[in-house]
């Protein structure tokens, strides 16, 4: 077990400058820095370079860029072929299509064949809120996590996204990274962004929290806001930034389990097979405690902006706060 006092970080002060940068832009910036020195870095898009914020990369490195058009299966298979030739391909496509239309290619060409392909699912979750269920990716965590040898990551802000991509550039294994479409406010800073590959970041103002809130992706910020609101009410909550959904940081969960009365999980995903299901499985098998899973409903979600969808289903600071208090009753 990890020593929690040595690995726990203080809850960060929330960014109040209004600085909002999409995680997809952080990916482009990081890959452009790498491509300057490493000509094996290649970006591939499925008619989505604008949506992926990869236009600057394509303009700067035309010989390291491939546009396949609206052909997600080809996108993944071509990426796998390039990887077998020694390239480091990053395949960009809307998460809703990348995780469904090219599922077999991700399973066979990438994971089963053990190729160094990084699948970047852009506009994940309900980023395309107004376009409805056809453009939502609420099943991708479950689908991609079910593939042996496939890793799944959901970074929470641009600083963590940068560190994740830098780490992925150094390894030779396939992975799926899901980022949203919209700008997100900073959680961390350039000088204070704790990061260990495949190790969750535990944030708390105390070493003995009452409840643990485990979140991933864009749900981490409202989780932190909820923890701060709970603190004002005399309730201590730690936040686990579980950017590494697979491999899940089970050690962090098991280290916290004896300290807390229960867990709340928060995800921009369907209620089955995602972060909540994984955490519940670990807790039930090793340290039975109450777990409440907060997720999107098992139904087509309402039409609206991401914020409107989140507010409708309580996936916001107020909803998380109320759920944590309910758990402690």
Image (spheres, grey):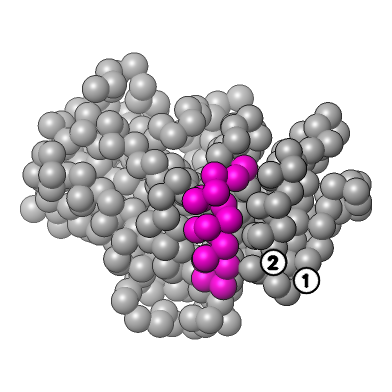
Q: Going from the N terminus, do you reach mark 2 or mark 1 first? A: 1
Near mark 1 (Cα within 10 A), the count class, few <14, some 14-19 or many ≥20, is few
Q: Is residue 191 left or right of residue 243?
A: right
Q: Position of residue 243 (x, y in %)?
A: 45, 43
Query: Is disc 2 placed on a helix, strand or loop?
Result: helix
The residue labelled by disc 1 is 69
Q: Is residue 18 visible?
A: no
Q: Is residue 10 visible?
A: yes
Q: Is residue 113 magenta?
A: yes
Q: Position of residue 138 (x, y in %)?
A: 44, 68
Q: 99 or 310: which is nearer to us?
A: 99
Q: 124 or 313: which is nearer to us?
A: 124
Would you place residue 304 above or below residue 91 in this image? below
The reply to whether the C-beta atoms of the residues labelled 2 and 1 are less than 8 Å apart is yes
The residue labelled by disc 2 is 74
Q: Is residue 221 left or right of residue 298?
A: right
Q: 304 or 1: which is nearer to us?
A: 1
Which quadrant of the figure has residue 321? bottom left
Q: Is residue 42 left or right of residue 80?
A: right
Residue at the (74%, 61%) spot, across then down: 45
* Nearer the camera: disc 2 or disc 1: 2
Q: Is residue 104 left or right of residue 323?
A: right
Would you place residue 254 above or below residue 89 in this image? above
Query: Is disc 1 placed on a helix, strand or loop?
Result: loop
Q: Which residues are magenta?
A: 99-116
Q: 256 or 65: which is nearer to us?
A: 65
Residue at the (63%, 48%) spot, across then down: 117
Q: Is residue 227 magenta?
A: no
Q: Position of residue 76 (x, y in %)?
A: 65, 60
């Amino acid at each position: 077990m990890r020593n929690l006092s040595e690995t726990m970080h203080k809850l960060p002060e929330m960014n109040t400058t209004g600085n909002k940068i999409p995680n997809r832009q952080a990916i482009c910036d990081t890959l452009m820095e790498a491509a300057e020195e490493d000509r094996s870095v290649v970006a591939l898009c499925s008619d989505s370079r604008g949506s992926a914020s990869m236009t600057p990369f394509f303009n700067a490195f035309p010989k390291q860029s491939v546009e396949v058009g609206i052909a997600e299966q080809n996108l993944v298979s071509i990426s796998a072929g390039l990887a077998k030739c020694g390239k480091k391909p990053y395949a960009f496509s809307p998460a809703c299509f990348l995780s469904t239309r090219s599922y077999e290619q991700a399973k066979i060409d990438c994971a089963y064949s053990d190729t160094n392909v990084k699948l970047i699912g852009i506009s994940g979750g309900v980023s395309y809120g107004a376009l409805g269920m056809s453009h939502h990716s609420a099943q991708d965590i479950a689908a991609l996590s079910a593939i042996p040898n496939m890793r799944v990551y959901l970074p929470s802000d641009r600083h963590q996204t940068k560190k994740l991509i830098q780490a992925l550039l150094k390894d030779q294994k396939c992975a799926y990274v899901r980022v949203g479409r919209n700008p997100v406010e900073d959680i961390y800073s350039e000088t204070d962004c704790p990061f260990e590959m495949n190790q969750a970041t535990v944030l708390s103002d105390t070493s003995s929290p009452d409840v643990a809130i485990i979140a991933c992706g864009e749900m981490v910020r409202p989780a932190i806001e909820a923890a701060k609101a709970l603190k004002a009410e005399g309730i201590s909550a730690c936040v686990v930034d579980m950017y590494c959904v697979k491999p899940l940081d089970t050690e962090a969960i098991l280290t916290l389990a004896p300290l807390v009365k229960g867990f709340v999980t928060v995800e921009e995903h369907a209620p089955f097979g995602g972060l909540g299901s994984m955490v519940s499985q670990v807790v039930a098998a090793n340290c039975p405690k109450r777990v409440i899973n907060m997720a999107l409903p098992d139904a087509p979600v309402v039409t609206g902006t991401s914020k409107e969808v989140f507010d409708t289903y309580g996936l916001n600071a107020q909803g998380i706060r109320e759920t944590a208090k309910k758990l402690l009753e």
